[in-house]
Amino acid sequence: TDNDDDDGLPPRLFALCEGGHPIELDPKTLDVVRNEAPLTSADGSDRVRSFFSAHFQRCPVTGDIYNHGFLIRPGPLPKQINVCKLSADGSLIAQAKSSLPFDCITHDSGMTSNHLVFFLPPYYIPNYDGLPSLVSGTSTLGDLLEWHGDDDTAYVQIHSRDCLTMRWRIALPDVTSLYHIVDAYEFEEVGDGSTTSGTICLKVRIAQHDPPRSRAIVEQQFSNQYEVAAGERINAVLREFTFRLEKDGEGTLIDTGSVAKDSAPCEFPVVNSAFC
């Protein structure tokens, strides 16, 4: 995180994980300054009330940090995601919960000038029978996740950067599996004359697993890249999705297609400006 140059304080360094809270480290020695704990507001009256993703977004204009976290909601409790906004120095400013179609760990996000974008693959926790082992530390959160590519679909959720809550949820026609969102961009469509219509066109590029096989195979591969059988390696392709977002909350997928089709296969495609 950044600190004001006038206060003479060094930047703060945190180790982040997918299913937990930040661990603060000394920027020079990497010694642990503070064990795993949720980030708090500047006055200490509030704290981040969820896990804290390893893939946050930082606004290039204000320096504010946006992140999201998984909420353990067993049984009939509604499935939810927590989205939070923090200052440049890591102090909590605001947070808000929104519903999810299923209990999944959202790995990454995309950010535009006004919105945050989340892809929700059908890799989720169908029940919490394994919760006792999770609480006891004998299993991990990942052990509870199951791939449902044959009987469910993937979704996209778009949240407001102002209030942090979900404004649109769009079901995708094809099974989609990914770790990372590459970029996102939005603009208002022009109506009659030169005025804007209020309808938003959103473009998002992701590093999509290819082929979108069972997520268990993907996770096994990335746990040990050196023991992948010949012909079984799953790489990623750069794909672009275009959405139309209406003011009344209606959202539709307009188009999707591969970008940089002749690029070399890899886990996270490198964008060559020749293809942009």
Image (spheres, helix red, strand yellow):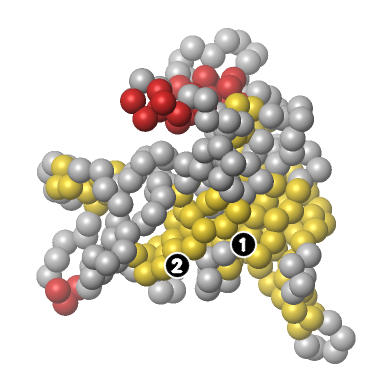
Pick the residue in front: 209 or 82. Answer: 82
Residue 181 shows in this picture: no
Amino acid under label 1? Met
Q: Position of residue 238 (x, y in %)?
A: 65, 43
- Does 255 sit left or right of 75 as displayed? right
Question: Separation of disc 2 and disc 1 at Cα?
Answer: 19 Å
Identify the residue under disc 2. 59
Front residue of this view, candidates 244 and 160: 160
Residue placed furthest toward the right: 192
Residues at discs 2 and 1 in contact (Cβ within 8 Å):
no
The answer to whether residue 103 is above or below residue 213 is below
Q: Is residue 80 visible?
A: yes
Q: Amino acid at mark 2?
A: Cys
Residue 267 falls in image quadrant: top right
Q: Nearer the viewer, residue 272 or 181?
A: 181
Q: Position of residue 37 (x, y in %)?
A: 26, 48
Which residue is identified by label 1? 166
Q: Residue at x 22, y 48 (%)?
A: 24
Which x, y percent locates residue 215?
61, 26
